[in-house]
Image: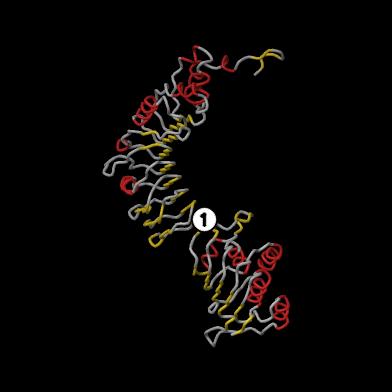
């Protein structure tokens, strides 16, 4: 604002005092309020009346932390605190308790900037208005028999909680009858994570992220629509989940120790190379000790040689491969011809330990010949490649491509490696 071409005036000089006070105490972000109240005596005496207190960006300056935990005077809708609690525990607890007495709706407490877990002796049964609760790097209790507490809670996020127990999970789903979103991120929990939300009508989203000590996950939630999992492979029981529309699994690379694996094509579809958002995702397994691999293909399937090859490349000590396609016919499609086939030609596959390959249900299909040629080219220690006819005499057989078969045989150093049965 200009009074003349060469003279500037302050905006606050043209505004009424009550409007300036309202802007300072209510409208500005809390970080700006804390900074500006020390600009003048007038601002310093202004009461903080902001209902949205977000202190998530002040943890880097220690004096700001101490200053922050000394202000709170009004009713609060949202309170966010991210700091190192060491040395200010009493003030933080006093602040949190004050928030809980002022009709708080959203509470976010994250103490992960400290190396010490913060124990919060807060009675959550007294919180009747809370709709969003996010806790990180702290210890707390949720009572399992509360008539009031957390009844309105819609979102619960627990991050780096040192000890999550079955009793705690049960208490959450007993009390939080309106819960819609539940997230467990980098928490410590041993054994089985069991979600009993059969009586919930609004529960929609479950996130389980980086929980190393889980064995299984059991879901009893008829209304669950989205499940997101990040971490190592675990068994997930979906038998009582009827409304699920989206399930995202992001597995970490795992090294397995067993020597024999018998599975179906569904396993390969989940754990080999895959395009995600335009980028190739690497396999999530390395079977370092695997000696024998048996796979049974069943329709429908998107598997082709590229998927099989990607898995075998993660098995450095594999000696025997059995592929059962008795009740299956490959349909590799255009994607194979345009993308996968070229990638196999330029990929450096190391299958030096494979000695025996058996294809059960061989029908002279073109893609079966692709598989044959793949093993002949890359299995340097191959001693026998056996092709067995389908066990069902009514199975459809294709016309043999003698020229292609002769070409494959010409690659062999030992002419008697391929056996037709």
- Could you say which is closer to the camera, residue 386 or residue 296? 386
Judge from the rendering whether residue 225 lies leftward or rightward of residue 299; answer left or right: left
- Image location of residue 307, percent across then percent down: 60, 65
Q: Position of residue 9 (x, y in %)?
A: 63, 14
Q: Position of 194 compared to 379: left or right?
A: left
Under circle 1, the secondary element is strand
Which quadrant of the view contains residue 373? Answer: bottom right
| Residue 49 horizontal side relative to residue 350, left or right | left
Q: Quadrant of residue 109?
A: top left
The residue at the point 54 percent across, 79 percent down is 326
Q: Quadrant of residue 311?
A: bottom right
Which class describes the residues within 10 Å of circle 1: few (<14), some (14-19), or many (20+)? some
Foreground pick, 244 / 209: 209
Q: Position of residue 238 (x, y in %)?
A: 41, 60
309 above or below 146? below
Total marks in image:
1
Q: Quadrant of the C terminus?
A: bottom right
19 up-or-down from 53: above or below: above
Q: Residue at x 55, y 83 (%)?
A: 390
In percent of width and height, residue 54 lies at 47, 30
Write down the residue under mark 1. Answer: 254
Image side of residue 204 versus residue 348, left or right = left
Residue found 59% across the figure and 59% down from its top:
274
State the residue in front, 101 or 400: 400
Quarter placement of the N terminus: top right
């Amino acid at each position: 604002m200009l009074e003349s071409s060469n003279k500037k005036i302050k905006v606050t000089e043209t505004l009424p005092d009550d409007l300036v006070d309202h802007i300072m105490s209510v409208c500005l972000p809390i970080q700006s309020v804390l900074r500006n109240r020390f600009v003048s005596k007038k601002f310093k005496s202004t009461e903080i009346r902001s209902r949205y207190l977000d202190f998530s960006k002040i943890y880097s300056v220690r004096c700001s932390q101490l200053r922050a935990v000394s202000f709170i005077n009004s009713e609060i809708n949202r309170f966010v605190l991210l700091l190192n609690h060491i040395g200010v525990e009493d003030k933080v607890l006093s602040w949190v308790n004050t928030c809980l007495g002022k009709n708080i709706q959203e509470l976010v407490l994250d103490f992960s900037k400290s190396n010490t877990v913060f124990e919060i002796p807060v009675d959550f049964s007294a919180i009747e208005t809370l709709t969003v609760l996010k806790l990180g790097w702290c210890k707390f209790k949720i009572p399992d028999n509360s008539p009031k507490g957390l009844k309105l809670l819609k979102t619960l996020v627990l991050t780096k909680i040192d000890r999550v127990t079955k009793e705690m999970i049960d208490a959450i789903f007993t009390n939080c009858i309106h819960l819609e979103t539940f997230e467990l991120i980098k928490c410590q929990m041993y054994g089985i994570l069991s979600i009993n939300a059969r009586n919930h009508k609004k529960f929609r989203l479950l996130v389980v992220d980086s929980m190393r000590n889980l064995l299984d996950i059991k879901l009893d939630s008829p209304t669950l629509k989205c499940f997101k999992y990040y971490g190592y492979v675990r068994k997930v029981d979906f038998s009582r989940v009827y409304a699920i529309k989206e399930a995202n699994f992001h597995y970490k690379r795992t090294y397995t120790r067993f020597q024999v694996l018998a599975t179906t094509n569904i396993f390969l579809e989940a754990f080999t190379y895959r395009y995600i958002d335009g980028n190739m995702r690497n396999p999530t397994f390395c079977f370092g000790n695997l000696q024998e691999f048996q796979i049974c293909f069943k329709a429908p399937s998107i598997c082709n040689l590229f998927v099989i090859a990607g898995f075998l490349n993660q098995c450095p000590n594999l000696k025997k491969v059995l592929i059962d396609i008795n009740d299956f016919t490959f349909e590799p499609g255009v994607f194979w011809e345009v993308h996968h086939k070229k990638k196999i030609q330029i990929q450096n596959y190391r299958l030096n330990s494979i000695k025996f390959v058996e294809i059960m249900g061989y029908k002279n299909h073109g893609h079966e010949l692709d598989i044959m040629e793949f093993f002949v080219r890359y299995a340097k220690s191959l001693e026998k490649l056996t092709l067995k006819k389908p066990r069902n005499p009514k199975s459809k057989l294709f016309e043999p491509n003698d020229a292609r078969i002769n070409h494959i045989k010409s690659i062999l150093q030992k002419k008697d490696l391929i056996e037709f049965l």
